[in-house]
Amino acid sequence: MDWTTIRLLYLSELRSALRERSVLINGILIPLLLYPLMMWVMFSGILFVTARFESFASRVEIAGLPDEHRGLLERLEEDEGRIEITEIEAPPTPTAAYREEVESRLLAGELDAALIFETSVDPPGNAAVSLLSNGSSDQSQAARGRLERALSAERSVWLDRIAEQHGLEGDEWQVFEVESDNLATGRQMGQFVMGMMIPLFFVLMIANGCVYPAIDSTAGERERNTWETTSTLATRRIHVVAAKYFYVATMGLVAGALNAAAMVVSFRSFLGPLLARIGGGDGSGFAFELPLTSLPVLLLTAVLLGALIAAAMMILAAFARTFKEGQSMVTPVILLVILPVLLLNDPSMSFTPALAGIPVVNVVLLLRQAIAGNLLWLQLGITVLANAAAIAACLWLASRILRVEEIATGSFEGNLFQFLRQRGRPVGGKA
Amino acid sequence: MSTVQVEVQGLTKNFFDQSRGEINAVQEVDFECRGAEIFGLLGANGAGKTTTLRMISTVLQPTAGTARVLGHDVVSDPVEVRRNLGFYSASTALYPRLTARETLTLFARVNKYPAERTKSRVEEMIERFGLGDYAGARIEKLSSGMKQKVSIARTVVHDPPVLIFDEPTVGLDVLNALDLQKAIQELRDDGKAILFSTHIMSEAERLCDRIAIIDKGRIRACDGLGGLRAATSQHYLEDIFVHYVTGNDTTA
């Protein structure tokens, strides 16, 4: 191989591509900016919705509140956001007519939520409580959430007090207490979320980064009438094809690497606070940090995927005579590589040596394992070998295809599948 | 007498077309071209000129026969053929996003012009073809006249002994066409062997030292203009061409 010539042609392709707006947008700007931008939009949206809720006062009506539970009013007022409480003392025993009247006001949007206490005589403060709200209204649901939180806290305090009056300690009467505890660290939770999201966007971005260069360097050359110019260069055709292939793979690799870097930064800067907002907690539960060992694996997967997708796309694009034809021939590759990622979105799926033998699938699983910090060396080795074999097969097929004069000169009217069907028939070019 | 630079013997090209079946585009074409000579292939559209030149430039492979450039066979030694050849045609466009200087440097380097002399050679070409003010501009920004000059410069930048010009004036205005013809004559004067195809009689008359009239893939006659006149008793090349292609004497 004449590596000096390949390098010259490769650099020329790269220089040319970096002056093309579409390549810059698809291969660099979108991978770099799309996800920070997307998360910023989501973050802003959540903030907007939250602020909107907080700006509204929850209109709540409480009927028959026993004296023992006056603390509930304080709890509601201490909760975040404004609240307007209307207290109805009578009727002490609510009638069906009163309930119907409250329901009609809730449905009409005149009220956000209502609490109706039906008290018992013994012990004092004991009550059956109805919480009424309108599930079709965001504002009503927010009011319901606030009432539930305050009511739950009030109930716990009252039960403790009653138990104490009866001389009971907490664990003597709380006999069927359910306690949930998340044992995962914040870092592990962050890695789990990243493991679900990064592979999908990563594969998509690498494929997206390859699309334009693959078409531009094949069909684009024919459309611009530069293919014949390239054919007259004093080098073997395989060197020209190799340079084009390295260029397409580089663009895929760059898109993937930029996307991964942007993704990690976005997770740290936007998704943590975002999840804190959604969960209503302090957000400290999630830590989006990639383990150091995952970084070389991330790079390796970008190389493997970039090389494989570039080879597959170039095989298909080799048949295209125009940019439009190229787009229709290459687009299915994106769907083909995305499909396994979507199918593998089950977190319980384990990375077995058998799955490591399937290109694309193995890279996605390897990526997920690496993000989780569990590197499986056997699977990694099989993944590299399987993908290397697939890349070699694609390149072999590409070199066989481009040896056919009719395809090299762009006079073949058809695609890969038609070509494979026609094999064995006489081929030539056009006069 | 200069040495033979291009030898073509029995060159044949058949194509297969789904609807028309086998097409004999070029049939047993023989000719040779020497240094400091412009050898013209004169024929109507579809006569087989471009296919013949594409086989010599290794873009297409012959079905039969041989073609050699400085002794290098187009089938067995295509890289050496291309190294000794500059190929210019209407279908060999320039890379639009490279500058003129980058284009010339790329063609010089890939076509194995000595690396240490590439820079000075590129500047020499820029000077010779008057590209100085535009050498740093991208090709896509240049006028068609300037693009044509860059195209000629990239064809000769690696200083090949053999040059092929396939209908080079197609689409050019009169002044640009005359400029191009002048450049080709200068290259002939530099000692280059030039294969020149055209369907424009006046161009062939003005430029070519010898002319091969090609029709339906076969060479019907091959000689200098004087020889063709003597053989046909016709003065104008147009009449000579009609004589060989249709067998009719237009002056009768």
Image: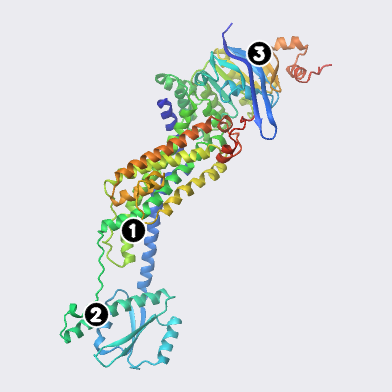
Q: Nearer the viewer, residue A185 or B235?
A: A185
| Residue B145 rendering spot, x and y as whole percentages | 58, 29
The reply to whether the C-beta atoms of the residues labelled 2 and 1 are less than 8 Å apart is no
Query: What amino acid type is highlighted by mark number 1?
Result: Leu
Does residue B46 appear in the picture of this structure? yes
| Marks 2,3: beta carbons within 8 A | no
Q: Amino acid at mark 2?
A: Ser
Distance between the Cα atoms at labels 3 and 1?
Answer: 77 Å
Q: How is the image coloured?
A: rainbow
Q: Position of residue A213 (x, y in %)?
A: 47, 40
Q: Secondary structure at mark 2?
A: helix
Q: Does label 2 or label 1 sit earlier along the sequence?
A: 2
| Horizontal and vertical percent position of residue A140 | 39, 77
What secondary structure is marked by label 3? strand
Q: Are marks 2 and 3 on the same chain?
A: no
Q: Quickly name the residue at label 1.
A: A271
Numbered mark located on residue B210 in the image: 3
Q: Residues within 10 Å of mark 3 (few under 14, many from 20)?
A: many
Residue occupied by mark 2:
A156
Task: Kindly give the residue lying farthest to the top in the view shown.
Answer: B1
> Which chain letter goes with mark 1?
A
In the picture, the quarter occupied by the N terminus of chain B is top right
Using the image, tell me which numbered label, if any, was put on residue B16: none
Q: Is residue A283 left or right of residue A207?
A: left
Badge 3: chain ID: B
